[in-house]
Amino acid sequence: MEHKWEEVFNLLSAGVYPPECVKSQKYTLKCYASKFTLQGEDLFFEDKKAVKSREEARALFEEFHIAPNGKHLGIGKSRRALCAKYYWFGMTRDIDKWVPECDKCKTRPLALAPIKIKKLARKPLQICRAVLNKKVEEAKKRAAYAAVDYHVKDNQIVGIGSGSTIVHVIKRLAERVRKENLNVFCVPTSFQTRLLIQDIGLMVIDLNRHLEIDVAIDGADEVDSELNLIKGGCGCLTQEKIVASCAKSFIVIADYRKDSSALGEQWKKGIPVEVIPMAYVPVSRAIQSQFGGSADLRMAVSKAGPVVTDNGNFLLDWRFDQEHNWSAVNTTIKMMPGVVDTGLFINLAERVYFGMEDGTVKIRDKNML
């Protein structure tokens, strides 16, 4: 830990690399050090002070692990308290280890066993749905694990997409960070993703400070044979496209239901289009006039009125009724006044991992088309 701190400090303060560094190691260290700033004799990761030694880190843990009311915090709360002000190399692994080692936490009384409630018998249709959902989740998990294991390396900035499949990406990433002591920094594409990343103890960074992302991993609503995507079912298409466009590699994960030969073959909910609120009617009419189909305002389920994106905009779902030149369609719609972006991701994906129903993972790579 102290050795890593000194390497970064020496590079930023004097431009000196460790004597044993070869060219590739120098490049890796340079990329990693770019995430830090030097203030006097201290290193800072964004606005968090980088802790130099294991002893100092342990002392900070002892301080933050105990709340002002004397209560000992659990792993998640200890992580959040420390991550708000400090950073050190391997902090997630250390906190996960130190909390269970706390003498008081060891002697906490066990929680009462939950009351067992007899489950009502399921109807055949409910059983079929449960089996299908389990298969789909397993397929998503396999695709996510394959992508994270192959593409994520130490000292990388990783873009994290949004949606149900991304939960598996975040879990696998956290597992690897703890087991392999990786230094990984995450750029979220939505408020929900940010909360998930923070809750599991991974480091969140701002795209405005770190413009180059090593790899971005995201899901998709549908993928065609040429790696064109429909995205935005979860309403985060603009942030997702920004992060994908800033990444050296954009990797997509999906289950077998999202694999299509042509867009619209599997996904029937249309192509999302994010628009500023005052423009949703003119844009809807323009899309229908030029391309046919129907472009309807997406309405919320748990509140009255339309869905509102993280950017404060509305979403139109354009259900098309014929095949199109998707690159031309994407450009035309984006040029309409009031359109923020579309859910068409054209020529962005480098590789797609499909978790298949039979337990395998199918890969579609743009270099093999």
Image: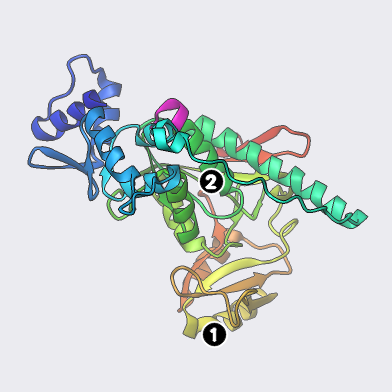
**Can you identify the residue that label 2 sits on?**
349
- Image quarter (top left, top right, bottom left or bottom right) of the N terminus: top left
- Image quarter (top left, top right, bottom left or bottom right) of the C terminus: top right
Q: Residue furthest right?
A: 124
Give the image location of residue 155, x and y in percent: 35, 33
Give the image location of residue 218, x and y in percent: 54, 48
Amino acid beneath label 1: Pro
Q: Is mark 2 on a helix, strand or loop?
A: loop
Q: In which quarter of the image is residue 352?
A: top right
Q: Is residue 348 above or below residue 336?
A: above
Asked whether residue 122 appears in the rendered view, the answer is yes
Span of residues in magenta: 178-182
Q: In this view, does 310 lie to the left or right of 83?
A: right
**Can you identify the residue that label 1 sits on?**
282
Q: Earlier in the sequence, mark 1 or mark 2?
A: 1
Residue pictured at 63% horizontal, 71% vertical: 317
Residue pictured at 28% horizontal, 33% vertical: 58
Q: Is residue 364 above or below residue 10?
A: below
Give the image location of residue 301, x and y in percent: 65, 74
Give the image location of residue 243, x and y in percent: 43, 52
